[in-house]
Image (cartoon, grey):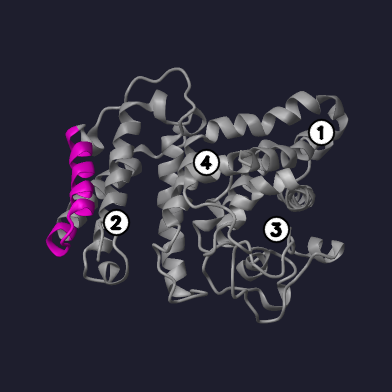
Amino acid sequence: MSTGLGRGAGRRFGSGWISGVLAVTCGALGYGGVLCLLFPSWLTTPSARALYPLELVRFLIYVMLVLGFGLGALSVVLRRRKVLGFTGIALATAGTLLGGSSAEIGTLGGTTAVGLDWFLLNLFILALLFVPLERVIPRLPEQAIFRPGWTTDLMHFAMSHLLVQVTVVLTMLPAGVLFRWATQPWLQDAVAAQPLALQFLEIVLVADFTQYWVHRAFHRVPWLWRLHAIHHSSETMDWLAGSRLHLLDIVVTRGLSFVPLYVLGFAPPAVYAYLVFVSFLAVFIHANVRFDLGPLDWLLATPRFHHWHHAANPVDKNFAVHLPWIDRLFGTAYLPAGRWPEVYGISGSPVPQGYWRQLAWPFLR
């Protein structure tokens, strides 16, 4: 029997399920965009506001509202259960009634811990890039876009992005408070004076060397593993699976990885370039895409390299995020020629499903 988020035949093409999910997604993106226009001080990240091309943003809000309403109507016509279709229509209508893409920008001032704009922007860009990519060159062609566990991973994605300002502060706090003594002006001036391209390469090397050992510790230290096991609990790999991370795992890993970058004093533009690079690479190496670099597989991490890190067997391999040769250097590399893992996740599946249960699980006996 089919449900509102039906399975099997209820999800087949022409059933109205796909159009319903897309209607809810587009309607929510459009409605959220309108809220960001109306309440920028509450819902947008201060450092990003000045960078947005406003006319393009308004156009995208308009497109999302139209698609939310149109796809919702299509789903209502096609589907016996009307929940998805009517939800998409309701979200699009609510956004339109609030002013739609022409809504006036609200008063600016103060700060907020909620980065709704950051969540919406990343969801739109990453889905637009990786969903088609996973259809064109899939590792597993039969794997559905809305596979089991996708709602849990979407919640992880949402919370980590909505709380971006909190996680950024907590990421930088250990370095600024505990390692200020280690900074040397002469060293920082010399590092920042280098060409930005060279600084970028140095950041990739320094950050991944640090992350390698932090990542390895999360697999070896029991109480850290209980946090990191959340990430490995996904039994399906795609662009959204990489978002399944406990918030404490995010803060600790990023906080420790930022320490050497802070101490060395790399120039902000080089750091920002690295953040863009790692944001896309971290999604790409989890994606359901058949891609490798052939003889250069040991130079830069690829999906096949990182998928073996998530394999149910063998375990504790391929800890590097960017540079696989670091694993070769320390004896933790595993990349059999032409092969991919058959099973992902943790043996016995000890981690529960659902975002809130996973958030609490590391602290439960």
Q: CA distance from mark 4 to mark 3?
A: 21 Å
Q: Secondary structure at mark 4?
A: helix
**Labels 2 and 1 touching (C-beta < 8 A):** no
Query: Is 81 a magenta residue?
Result: yes
Residue type, label 2: Leu
Q: CA distance from mark 4 to mark 1?
A: 31 Å
For residue 308, side relative to residue 104 (left or right) = right
| Image point (29%, 56%), residue name | 21
Of 206 and 227, which appears nearest the observer? 227
Q: Position of residue 254 (x, y in %)?
A: 67, 41
Q: Within 10 angstroms of label 2, few (less than 14), some, or many (20 or more) residues?
A: many
Image quadrant holding the C terminus, namely top right
Q: CA distance from mark 2 to mark 1?
A: 48 Å
Q: Position of residue 247 (x, y in %)?
A: 58, 40
Check disc 3 and report the residue beneath it: 322
Q: Secondary structure at mark 3?
A: loop
Check disc 2 and report the residue beneath it: 22
Q: Secondary structure at mark 1?
A: helix
Nearest-to-viewer mark from 1 and 3 = 3
Q: CA distance from mark 4 to mark 2?
A: 22 Å
Q: Position of residue 314 (x, y in %)?
A: 72, 69
The part of the chain drawn in magenta is 75-97
Check disc 4 and report the residue beneath it: 160
Residue at the extreme bottom? 338
Query: Is 237 a magenta residue?
Result: no
